[in-house]
Image: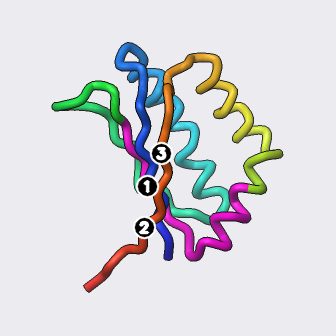
Amino acid sequence: MITCYLVYTIDPYKVKEFETYGKMWIPLVNKFGGTHHGYFLPHEGANNKGVALFSFPSLAEYEEYREKIKTDPECQEAFDYAQRTRCIISFERSFMKPVFP
């Protein structure tokens, strides 16, 4: 299993828009075989950071997902929403391997 850890720098005046964006993506990741663990919004501390976590059974399956989202209409709608609202300033993507007991 591989978990994608996304850290977003968001516009602190557009947290609601970022929340809407997150709610758009959760079912889309699941639709393409991933397991979304949620989006996390600023609460205390930095007001311009958001996080998303989702997992795929393998890096290869994640790469397949990345190809499929390029042509999926719902995914394009989510990308367009973020661009239109300018709620995301930048993001960093890392991959982690979970440890279980």
Q: Is residue 36 left or right of residue 42?
A: right
Looking at the rendered image, the disc whose residue lies closer to the viewer, 1 or 3, is: 3
Asked if the stretch drawn in magenta spans residue 60, the answer is: yes
Q: Earlier in the sequence, mark 1 or mark 3?
A: 1
The circle on residue 92 is: 3
Q: Secondary structure at mark 1?
A: strand
Tell whether 89 sits left or right of 44: right
Secondary structure under tag 3 reads: strand
- Whether 59 is among the magenta residues is yes
Estimate the x, y position of residue 84 in percent, counting from the top left. Answer: 64, 17
Percent coordinates x, y for residue 51 in the rendering: 38, 43
> Which residue is rendered at x = 28% and y = 32% of the image?
42
- Which residue occupies the extreme left position in the image? 44
Residue at (78% x, 46% y) in the render: 70
Q: Residue furthest right?
A: 71
Residue 5, picture quadrant: bottom left
Q: Residue at x 50, y 71 (%)?
A: 2
- Type of residue at label 2? Met
Residue 40: mark = none
User: Given contact means CB atoms under 8 Å apart, are the residues at marks 2 and 1 in contact?
Assistant: yes
* Residue indicated by mark 2: 96
Give how far apart the Cα atoms at labels 1 and 3 are: 8 Å
Give the amino acid type for the residue marked by disc 3 in the picture. Glu
Spatial separation of the CA atoms under disc 2 and disc 1: 7 Å
Residue extent of the magenta highlight: 50-66
Which residue in the structure is indicated by mark 1?
5
Would you place residue 4 above or below residue 46 in this image? below
Residue in the picture at 33% in, 35% down:
41
Where is 58 relative to 7, above or below? Answer: below
Q: Amino acid at mark 1?
A: Tyr
